[in-house]
Image: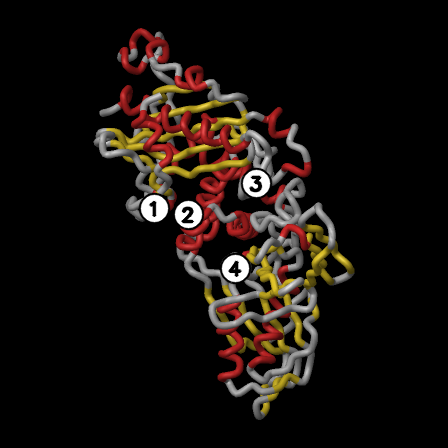
Amino acid sequence: MSNLSRRALLAGLGISAANTALAKAPASSIIPLARPMAQAPAAQRPDVARDVVGELGLSGKTAYVVADARSGRLLASYNPLLAMPTASVAKAITAQYALDALGRTHSFVTRIMATGALAEGVVEGDLILVGGGDPMLDTKDLAGLVDTVVARGIRAVRGRFLYFAGPLPQIEEIDGKQPAHVGYNPAVSGLNLNFNRIYFGWKKNGDGYDVELDARSENARPQVDSIQLSLAERGSPVYDYRKQGQSEIWSVSRRALGTGGGRWLPVRQPDTYAAEVVQALAAAKGLQLTRPEPISKLPRVMELARHHSLPLHRVLRSMMYYSTNLIAEVVGLNASLALGNQPGTLRASAANMSDWMQRHLGARRPRFVDHSGLGDTTRVTAQDMANAMVRIGPDSTLAAMMRKFPLPKEANGISVVAKTGSLNFVSGLSGFANIGGRDLAFAIFSADLPRRQAILPQERERPRGAKPWATQARVLQHELIMDWARRFSA
């Protein structure tokens, strides 16, 4: 392996500066190389290409496809029809699915509404927090809603304080195989807050600890009653979680805390969480509300305040940059609803996306189980993924959302934008490469599923061997791209 390749791999990823214009996707699919192979230019014959996969000896299985992104001409492939887990590469399809269903300027709206008239600063009825499927709603946004209500002169509410999460299903976690405490596996709802996480902070104070548990923003740290945390005298597990009625109860090993720190813990009832934060923010402004209660149907109401999310293309750019699982699941569910489906689960919505990928992107056998790629039973072939990139195109909004794969100065005339994906012993990369003015579309998937399935429960967050395997998988991706640059330049 060259030092050039290794340096480029380990440099990290930057933000793509690609054009953000929408481009109409070509109707063509990947076109196979002409047969017999002897008719193809010598540099493009698989028998004279480097055996990059064999050279690096990555355990498990690898599949890849690279094609001309303009014509769809197949340039090289390895196990192209092998169904592979995608990890977060799935988010590229989710982004295009949402753009197609909702439109790039779509905005998610969160509102505070009332069922009764206003009379001298008093709501003669109930106050209702209404979710609109915003995956990026935070405490600062809710504070803005409360400020708008108070600015209207409202100082009292005669009725109850209610909350309505909207038509999206309430899902307690994306993937049930993940450790309970990891923030990348939150609940999913039509009323989300702070990426459905709550901040847990601790600092040693003498023989004990000062503990914080709040929905913090820059200017406020509202606390909620339904989520509780205690310190336990045990060695393991470090985190323990259980539900008791409407309460979420965490206990944490005191021995694991050290001198201080903080992390965000997942919230399993985000609609209740958001409503309690509104109640706390309103109380801080002198507006007392009753304990929030959920409702399943929205009555006739009058709007008092609203918050618009960023437009969808900016929400999706954030999702692609940070690979945020919650955004992927929420926008995927919203897309399924917009296309006339009524998915009651992530799996059902992901099946809708699989069908959409077949109809619109020419895929033959995709099987998504969620929209984020967190579930390891999603299966997509490298051919289907590369073909999707050909159809979407290198001038598309999706391509502009992808992160730039940095290359060293020595690799003149080469640029790559792609979506990465990683789970323990699973790695993927798919996107576009421009090599000497020629646009390529590609997909690379690697997975060692026997090693993944052998991970012990207590090692699920940091299993032995996973980090060096992931590094080797990234090196493989990089070496393939450099090999294609040598073989397929314009």
Report if residue 351 is visible in the image: no
Viewer-side residue, 341 vs 432: 432
Q: Position of residue 144 (x, y in %)?
A: 49, 73
Structural distance between the alpha carbons of marks 4 and 2? 18 Å
Which amino acid type is marked by label 2?
A: Tyr
The structure residue drawn at horizontal position 50% and vertical position 39%, both measured from the top left corner, is 88
Viewer-side residue, 332 vs 456: 456
Q: Quadrant of the C terminus?
A: top left
Q: What label does residue 321 carry, if any?
A: 2
Residue 438's image quarter? top left
Which amino acid type is marked by label 3?
A: Leu
The residue singled out by tag 4 in the image is 134
Q: What label does residue 484 carry, if any?
A: none
The residue singled out by tag 1 in the image is 15
Q: Earlier in the sequence, mark 3 or mark 4?
A: 4
The residue singled out by tag 3 in the image is 374
Residue 293 higher or lower than 315, as above or below: below
The structure residue drawn at horizontal position 57% and vertical position 64%, both measured from the top left corner, is 131
Q: Nearer the viewer, mark 3 or mark 4?
A: 3
| Circle 4 Cα neighbour tier, 10 Å, few/some/many (<14 / 14–19 / ≥20) | many
Q: Earlier in the sequence, mark 4 or mark 1?
A: 1
Structural distance between the alpha carbons of marks 3 and 4? 20 Å
| Circle 1 Cα neighbour tier, 10 Å, few/some/many (<14 / 14–19 / ≥20) | some
Q: Earlier in the sequence, mark 2 or mark 1?
A: 1
Look at the numbered disc 1 and give the secondary structure of its residue: strand
The structure residue drawn at horizontal position 37% and vertical position 24%, both measured from the top left corner, is 480
Q: Earlier in the sequence, mark 2 or mark 3?
A: 2
Residue 291's image quarter? bottom right
